[in-house]
Image (cartoon, helix red, strand yellow):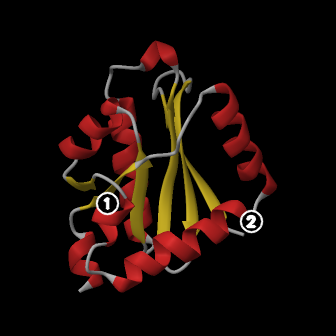
């Protein structure tokens, strides 16, 4: 249901892969930075922050709004350092905004669950990782201006 792009970080000298970010383009005008993966050898070198920054800039170049769902402290440090606004949960993000509430409670779940791979991932993560999918949300600070 959604178009995807991959942002790649590679070593300039060797071309070796350092990490990737997966971007899902969703309706209506949102793009999710869905996965940020840095190879273990390169963690702690700022690669994750570069991937998030470049993914957000790429999304903005498409005139779309970036959103990132996360639960790890390491990702929170990255998005705060990059100047993203963070929200404790979907309720805080959607507060006083009907378009955000409609996106988070109706449009996003329909798009997300429409793909069998994602439904399988939900089951796998719940069973093996005991994940409860209680995510915080981050958006670039200028998103507020785009929605006004």
One can see residue 8 in this view: no
Question: Based on the displayed image, in which of its 4 quarters is residue 25 positioned?
Answer: bottom right
The percent position of residue 65, horizontal first and vertical second, equals 39, 70
55 vs 31, nearest the viewer: 31
- Which of 66 and 136 lies nearest the eye of the viewer? 136
- Locate residue 107, reporting x and y percent: 57, 76
Q: Residue at x 55, y 35 (%)?
A: 131
Earlier sequence position, callout 1 versus callout 2: 2
- The circle drawn on residue 139 is 1
What residue appears at the point 41 percent right and 53 percent down from the top-left corner?
68
From what the image shows, is residue 110 above or below residue 55? below
Instruction: Quickly name the residue at label 2.
Output: 114
Left or right: 8, with 119 as reference point: left
Specify whether 23 is left or right of 47. right
Q: Position of residue 96 (x, y in %)?
A: 26, 80
Q: Secondary structure at mark 1?
A: strand
Quick one: quadrant of the C terminus? bottom left
Badge 2 crowding class, 10 Å Cα cut-off, few under 14, some 14 to 19, many 20 or more, is: few
Residue 131 visible in the current orientation: yes
Q: Are marks 1 and 2 in contact (CB under 8 Å)?
A: no
């Amino acid at each position: 249901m959604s178009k995807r792009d991959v942002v790649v970080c590679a070593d300039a000298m060797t071309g070796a892969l350092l990490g990737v970010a997966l971007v899902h383009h969703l309706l209506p005008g949102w793009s999710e930075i869905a996965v940020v993966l840095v190879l273990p050898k390169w963690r702690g070198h700022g690669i994750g922050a570069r991937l998030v920054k470049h993914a957000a800039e790429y999304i903005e170049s498409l005139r779309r709004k970036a959103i990132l769902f996360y639960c790890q402290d390491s990702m929170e440090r990255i998005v705060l350092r990059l100047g993203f606004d963070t929200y404790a949960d979907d309720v805080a993000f959607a507060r006083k905004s009907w378009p955000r509430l409609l996106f988070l409670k109706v449009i996003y779940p329909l798009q997300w669950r429409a793909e069998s791979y994602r439904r399988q991932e939900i089951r796998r993560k719940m069973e093996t990782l005991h994940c409860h999918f209680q995510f915080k949300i981050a958006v670039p600070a200028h998103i507020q201006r785009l929605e006004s």
